[in-house]
Image: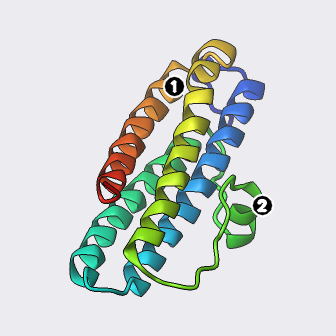
Amino acid sequence: MNTNIGISQQNLQAVAAALSKLLADEFVLYTKTRNAHWNVEGPDFHSMHIFFEQQYNALDETMDSVAERIRQLGHFAPATLKSFLSLTHLTEVSREKNDSMGFIKELVVDHENIIIYIRENINRMANEYGDAGTSDFITGLMEEHEKMAWMLRAHLK
């Protein structure tokens, strides 16, 4: 049964496609944050281990909400590593050292890339696709990423 919420099927498909890219970005960022949690080394190990855990827990909730939003619009959320890697805007970085500053710098860039992607889509969702709900939803996600990026950036001062 088609989703009939006052948005054309074509526009619902476009919104779901944009959200699928966002979900892929969220998943890759979650994985990179988990990597930082598992592999950080140095004199600040304990505090950073806890900090990265808080961040990946927040990202886990974000991923779930994005996937559920895609389902609310009548589409299936991508859910394989292959699909995430084909959809993401983010890249994986190989590192020589597993120090907190290296992880933090990389994660800040990823959060900022997600913020830019969301910001580019806020008005598109509402104005081009007629989906004020998703526009509002991703505005909230953008604010969450802005806060997480700020918390990461504060360690670089």
Residue 11, located in which quarter of the rendered image? top right
- Identify the image quadrant of the C terminus: bottom left
Residue 135 disc label: 1
Q: Nearer the viewer, residue 59 or 93?
A: 93
Instruction: Provide residue 86's location: percent of width, then percent of height.
Output: 77, 61
Residue 23 disc label: none
Left or right: 83 with respect to 95? right
Instruction: Provide residue 24's location: percent of width, then percent of height.
Output: 63, 57
Q: Nearer the viewer, residue 150 or 53?
A: 150
Residue 16, located in which quarter of the rendered image? top right
The residue pinned by badge 2 equals 86
Within 10 Å of disc 1 (Cα), the crowding (few <14, some 14-19, many 20+) is many
Identify which residue is drawn at 68% across, 71% down: 81
Instruction: Provide residue 7's location: percent of width, then percent of height.
Output: 65, 20
| Amino acid tagged 2 | Ser
| Amino acid tagged 1 | Ser
Relative to 145, does residue 6 appear above or below in the rendering? above
